[in-house]
Amino acid sequence: MADTATNDPVYKTDALIAEDIDTYLSTHQHKTMLRFITCGSVDDGKSTLIGRLLYDSKMIFEDQLAALENDSKRVGTQGQEIDFALLVDGLAAEREQGITIDVAYRFFNTEKRKFIVADCPGHEQYTRNMITGASTADLAVILVDARKGVLVQTRRHSYLCNLIGIKNIVLAVNKMDLVDYSEEVFDKIVADYSEFAKSIGIESFTAMPISGFKGDNITKAPSANTPWYKGPSLVDHLETVEVRSAEDQDKPFRMPVQWVNRPNLDFRGFSGLIATGGVKPGDAVRVLPSGKTSTVKSVVTFDGELDEAVAGQSVTLTLDDEIDCSRGNVLSVADNPPEVSDQFEASIVWLADEDLIVGRNYWLKLGTQTVSAAVQEPKYKVDVNTMEHLAAKTLSLNEIGVAELFTDKSIVFEAYQQNRALGGFILIDKITNQTVAAGMLNFSLRRAQNVHWQPTDITRADHAAMKNQKPRVLWFTGLSGSGKSTIANEVEKRLALMNRHTFLLDGDNVRHGLNKDLGFTEADRIENIRRVGEVAKLMTDAGLIVLTAFISPFRAERQMVRDMLAEDEFIEIFVDTPLEVAEERDVKGLYKKARSGQLKNFTGIDSPYEAPESPEIRVNTVEMTPEEAAEHIVRAILPLK
Amino acid sequence: MSEHVNLTHLQRLEAEAIHIMREVVAEAEKPVMLYSVGKDSAVMLHLARKAFYPSPPPFPLLHVDTTWKFQAMYELRNEMAERSGMELLVYQNPEAKERGINPFDHGALHTDMWKTEGLKQALDLYGFDAAFGGARRDEEKSRAKERVFSFRTASHGWDPKNQRPELWNLYNARKKKGESIRVFPISNWTELDVWQYIHLEDIPIVPLYFSEKRPTVERDGMLLMVDDERFPLAEGEEPVMRSIRFRTLGCYPLTGAVESEAATLPEVIQETLLTTTSERQGRAIDKDEGGAGMEKKKQEGYF
Ligand SMILES: Nc1nc2c(ncn2[C@@H]2O[C@H](COP(=O)(O)OP(=O)(O)OP(=O)(O)O)[C@@H](O)[C@H]2O)c(=O)[nH]1
Ligand SMILES: [Mg+2]
């Protein structure tokens, strides 16, 4: 701790605070903000460095310091000396293990700036937390242990920082105290890193030799131990680097609409955070995706109307016309609008324990838009160590890949490189509600805005009226051998007797034609159901009552079909037969084959069946005959129009 | 545009908080704002009014009352609810009331029953699925780790080792029935930011934050204010008039006062900046469980 006194910080202007608080406050009020992260490999000293920054900036209070000294002796990693990491590693599990698990956000001020620093975990296992921290950062301090040099995690984090668009990179070669403050060691690491950085597209970075533990080159440079170092101290650098927000103001105006503000009939405002550019009353604007134009009437805030608002401000805009605009739409400058599309190439970082399921629908949230999206088989994934592109069938936890992505509705977007707010997205699992991926749109595969629906004169309603019925899909789901086809067939017979127009799509007949190119892998089964859903949907457009008999084992895909149809047109019928009973029936001898291993991915045996949680209709085939079940179903769906 | 507008850190923090509040209103089914009448609550209420102006904030205020707040807090609470045009819900845990749970006799149980249990009961009773809170990351070491959208199980538990990733300003508000989200729009503000914002925006706060001569007694090194006759004096204990104020306002016997002459906001800020102890130091809650007090409380459903 010998250096602490000599590093007496310049951050906190105690004298000014004591003498002239008003002047101090007005200076403080006008400070800009820099958000940065510390990242790099396990134990390279990230948390220690932040603890040091807080300590040197006197952000640590006496009671906290006393607790720190105590904790350092009890669970610290530095014997009797202060373990600065304990200031930051705030979770019980972290303190016990001496590692960082989740990001910690800490704050400090200098005379010039206010800083928000996110201390990221080094362990690969917690990459999703590191990304969380990186996504809002203007700058990244990448630490390297001087004794170990550039490691896999140093590369992974550098790659992610660059992918997520952090322009300012600091390479902090830490623990210089353990290599005798050797210039050669430093130069060697900087040379290694330079080569790697160039290969992944990092154009420039600032390197500095430091010791977070002893305090060298943190607030003052060069420290007595590194007279050979000619660059700035870490704090000097943080105080003076250019921040991104100015750049955003130079881009064309875009504001995703968050909320329509409608206190009474005379006021209709569109609230949002301006993503890029600026806006003034009188500006011509366009609403996307509809493309309608209007003029800005006023920029409304609680503090009065503004003459101008810019990127980074939350405002409410009123327009001259009563045009249609709601949450999920984007307001943009009229003559330079963003694109609209439903097919993209995207870079994706997978954040969930369960692998990506190709073809499955996830929620995609981008700006204020939420749509269904399916990721296609990845073009490749990236080996972060060698930067090689590897073939991939899916993406697993912490893997980074590039894939095509299709959304069910067109969305307003820009390439992430140009606009973070309209290019960055998350994927959410529809069943668990977990955030499973972070992604960045690279470009659109085609311009969806040019695709127009073929207008037809005979409408859906006409088709249904001619058939004197309400179109619906009766979706039978259940194990193989549960009785889906038999019961569906019985139901169709009854409906025919009632003069209804129906059609039965059955697992076997569809697989021989429409879907004969599909096998039984998870991805193929999803595609199978998607196609059946689309066909069933077309048939309801034609006014038919459609019956489908597919195992359809996954909740997510049944939900996908439900989402394709109008609210009350999807009727899920759970043919509830216990596995033992279905297996004993074994009409086609399939269970036997599956048990003996001849048949792979068989539902109920080595592939799961996710029973419906609240089906519209449930029939128990142990208690009911197929005829009774059919009766029950027909009665439940009356009236038919 | 050639001229850049330089947004100050407070402007950026304000815009961020407003954005968060609007996201919740757009995506949650039934949001509520927890209102404890402290300075952070004052800032939250002010931000909510800004976020939805000219509409009143489209959610009610919920005060989980312990019946042991300072009198001045009850007064300001009622006044502010009226001014904002928002509905004010006050909830008091009936069991705690019946058992006469109080901070003098029951210590930790008081916080547990009135606040933690009371909050859970109130959220369940009204079926709120998102609750705004004014907690900040600079307050305490486990708070520093918490997401802006902090997901809670149906039994209100927080799982610190399994938080959802939270990227950019995209918040995942999806949850199953019964689960809920605690949302912290001023996560990134510091104590100084809050004070300065109150100063710049002229936000009304409880007078107890400013120094005045008040009756006090000293116990276990803590200065306690004798707010009214509910304060049981020990044998031979005599209230002494001292110039005191509060840095943080909890339940009155649990929150210690500091001796101070700071009677204006700039003076309060000055004192805050020159002080050598942390804001929560006067609060008993952080000291339990060997340094993991807050984390443990939150796992049990505390805010
Ligand atoms: N000698 C010396 N030791 C250091 C220095 N910086 C950190 N350490 C020690 O290195 C060990 C790991 O430090 P941490 O700060 O916990 O490392 P980290 O990078 O935050 O680790 P994770 O977050 O778990 O990846 C601790 O024992 C620190 O005291 C340094 O500059 N010099
Ligand atoms: Mg760490």
Image (spheres, coloured by chain):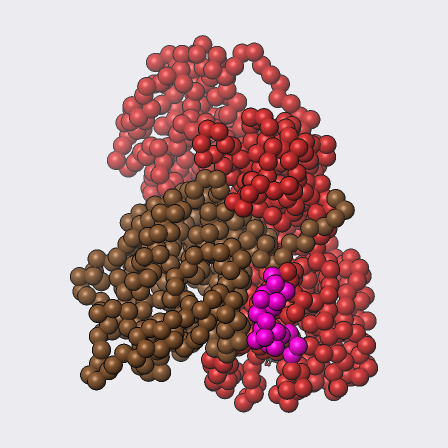
Chain colours: A red, B brown
**Residue plotted at (35% across, 33% down):** A616
Quadrant placement of the N terminus of chain B? top right
- On screen, A127 above or below A341? below
- On screen, A343 above or below B233? above
Q: Does the magenta stretch include residue A432?
A: no
Task: Report the side of A443 relative to A489 (left or right).
Answer: right
**Between A597 and A640, which is closer to the camera in this rendering?**
A640
**Between B288 and A582, which is closer to the camera in this rendering?**
B288
Q: Main secondary structure of the magenta part?
A: helix
- Quadrant of residue A241 in the image? bottom right
Pinpoint residue B272: horizontal percent, then vertical percent.
Answer: 50, 72
Pinpoint residue A150: horizontal percent, then vertical percent.
Answer: 72, 71
**Residue plotted at (64% across, 87% down):** A5
Magenta span: A9-29
**Residue plotted at (42% across, 23% down):** A472
Pinpoint residue B254: horizontal percent, then vertical percent.
Answer: 32, 72
Task: Report the side of A377 relative to B29 (left or right).
Answer: right
Task: Report the side of B271 relative to A281 (left or right).
Answer: left
- On screen, A226 above or below B16? below
